[in-house]
Amino acid sequence: MKRIVVEKKILEKNDDIANSIRSLLNKNRVFGLNVMSSPGAGKTTLIERMVEALKPKYKIAAIDGDLDTQRDAQRIAALGIEAVQINTSGTCHLDSSMVQKALNDISLDLDLLIIENVGNLVCPASFYLGTHKNAVLISTPEGDDKVKKYPTMFNVADVVLINKMDIAQFVNFDVEKVEQEIKELNPNAMIFKISALKNDGLDEFLNWVEDNIQSIKNQ
């Protein structure tokens, strides 16, 4: 019972801070997107493609979460936008207090804030960060069994991007099975089939991002 109570208090505190982050984003009319996946699924490459495509029209910043190193933030910053790295020192997810601190180093004269969560298909799903939408990547080399094995992650997804479609046939990835399992679990989730590395299939997803940016601007 004590363990359950402690966990509840931790999540309640996290949600309180996350709600203040959401209010801050709304006040500044910034669309916040939380990008989650397992390690190596292609989050950073996807974000690079997003920045390359959207930077000519929108002001963008990124917060990158990782256990150690500055590598992800360095890759994103090299594209000419603000990027802040959060090193969690072993923690398997970002929480709202980490994001709140990182926002102190970012100008909110923005259109889009992208948060790259720590590579993990379990813990990040439980910690609301105040963003407007959640994007979850699953890559074909991971196998086609991940949706049912990690249902909480796919339950919180607003969009699911099936990445590395260019090699799906070589790793026996059953795309139709994965799409069906996503729809059974989360009928409202949009699904995009892409190859971020080859910049293939991203147009519809980018249109979705732009629609959300405009929606926040017009609220």
Image (spheres, helix red, strand yellow):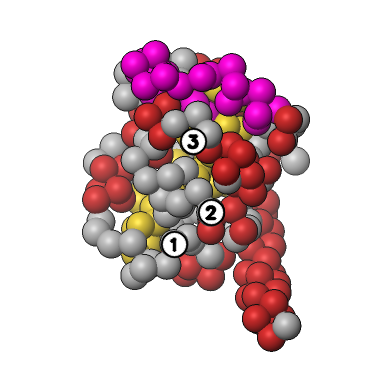
Q: Where does residue 189 sit, x and y in percent of width and height?
A: 68, 31
Classify mark 2: residues with Cα within 10 Å, few (<14), some (14-19) or many (20+): some
Query: Badge 1, how many Cα within 10 Å: few under 14, some, many 20+?
Result: some
Is residue 23 depicted above or below 183 in this figure? below
Residue 94 seen from this side? yes
* Mark-to-mark CA distance, 1 and 2: 9 Å
- In this orientation, which residue lies closer to the viewer: 76 or 183? 183
Let me know if residue 17 appears in the view.
no
x and y, in percent, of residue 187 in the image: 75, 30
Q: Is residue 160 left or right of residue 1?
A: left
* CB contact under 8 Å: marks 1 and 2: yes
What residue sits 64% from the left and 63% below the top? 18
Q: CA distance from mark 1 to mark 3?
A: 17 Å
- Amino acid type shown at disc 3: Leu
Count every numbered label the image shows and give the total. Answer: 3
Q: Secondary structure at mark 2?
A: loop
Q: Which residues are magenta?
A: 161-183
Q: Is residue 195 magenta?
A: no
Q: Which residue is mark 3?
A: 137
Return the residue at label 2: 122
Question: Which residue matches tag 1?
Answer: 92
Considering the image in quadrants, where does the N terminus appear? bottom right
